Amino acid sequence: MKIIECVPNFSEGKNKETFEAIKLALDSTKGVKLLNLEPDEDYNRVVVTMVGTDEGILEGAVNASIAAAEHIDMRYHKGEHPRIGAIDVVPFIPISGSTMKECVKISEKYAEIISEKLNVPVYLYEYSARKPERQNLANIRKGEYEGLEEKLKDPEWQPDYGPAVFNPKLGAIVTGARFFLIAYNVNIDSTNLSYAKEIAEVLRESGYPKRDENGNIIKKDGKTIKVPGRLKSVKGMGVALEKFNLTQVSINLTNYNVTPLHVAFEEVKKEANRLGVKVKGSEIVGLVPKEALLMAGKFYTKDKTDNEKDLINAAIENLGLDYLAPFKPEEKIIEYMI
């Protein structure tokens, strides 16, 4: 059976009317199933996870986006997480019986349809990107919504679909095909954001700017020299989590086979210890493949068991996935949800 996943991130983490509108749009769409809708008030965004056939997932993504667009106005949006628009990013992921090439075509069709319906600029990223500099989502988001009007004036940043005209209400949309991404946050027991930011810079693949002894950024031929980070296929940043009096190293694992969950967690612990702060568990935003938790479970049990339930419980306990909220495998593991 062909199964494709879509994980839209919408810039609204508080308004229940928006969430209900998105749910209703998906409930009335054939060939698609809503698996998870996870809002975050501090980030002020909601991560929606759906699966479906190629036709169902395309229609579901379009319908959910239109519903969100009716309720979100970026002129009044504030949040901890980087974003470029109301329908911030809409990735398509091959899960079963589908290919990355098929997902690229779906993302292009989505971009064509949604740009016309909402009169909004759309950028293609990851495997769908038509320019190397647009493969990385962070490059497209640079300047965020607040800098988008000026960015659209730059010929190098003309959208792949839609008008090169600033839409004040909706901003822009990024879409594309990618590998399964795990949104993973590690909690730092401090309200001082500098610790989480430094840990993220040291670990993320893109690293951080090299500085001289006076703290000035070193450049060569006008370009900033970067110190590479320790972990491959990892994006990261430091964010505040005010309602829990914590900060977080907010991580995107773009390929958990390259850098698994437990490796990211243990490296954050190592850096936190170096800085004199403690880690207080972690959280997975949205859904996670079963394999990723089994890998962590095998690491923490030292391969002493092959029992699936025991391995998953070991991963939950050692990664501290229950620290902020109960981690229910039947609601968080994608294979258990389909």
Image (tube, grey):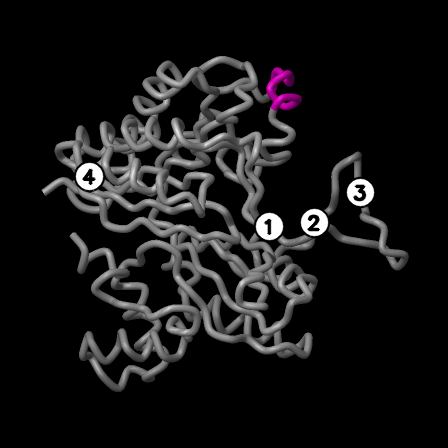
Measured as percent of width and height from the top left, residue 228 is found at: 63, 55
Q: Which residues are magenta?
A: 149-156
Q: Earlier in the sequence, mark 3 or mark 4?
A: 4
As helix, strand or loop, the secondary structure at mark 1 comes to: loop
Residue type beneath disc 1: Ser
Which residue does the numbered mark 2 point to in the structure image? 226
Pointers 1 and 2 in contact (C-beta within 8 Å): yes
Residue 55 falls in image quadrant: top left
- Secondary structure under tag 2 reads strand
Q: How far, Cα to Cα, is label 1 from label 2?
A: 8 Å
Q: Position of residue 68 (x, y in %)?
A: 37, 32
Query: In this image, 1 relative to 294: left or right?
Result: left
Residue under label 4: 98
Residue at which label 3 appears: 219
Direction right: furthest residue: 214
Are discs 1 and 4 less than 8 Å apart at CB? no
Determine which residue is flagged by label 1: 206
Q: CA distance from mark 4 to mark 2?
A: 37 Å
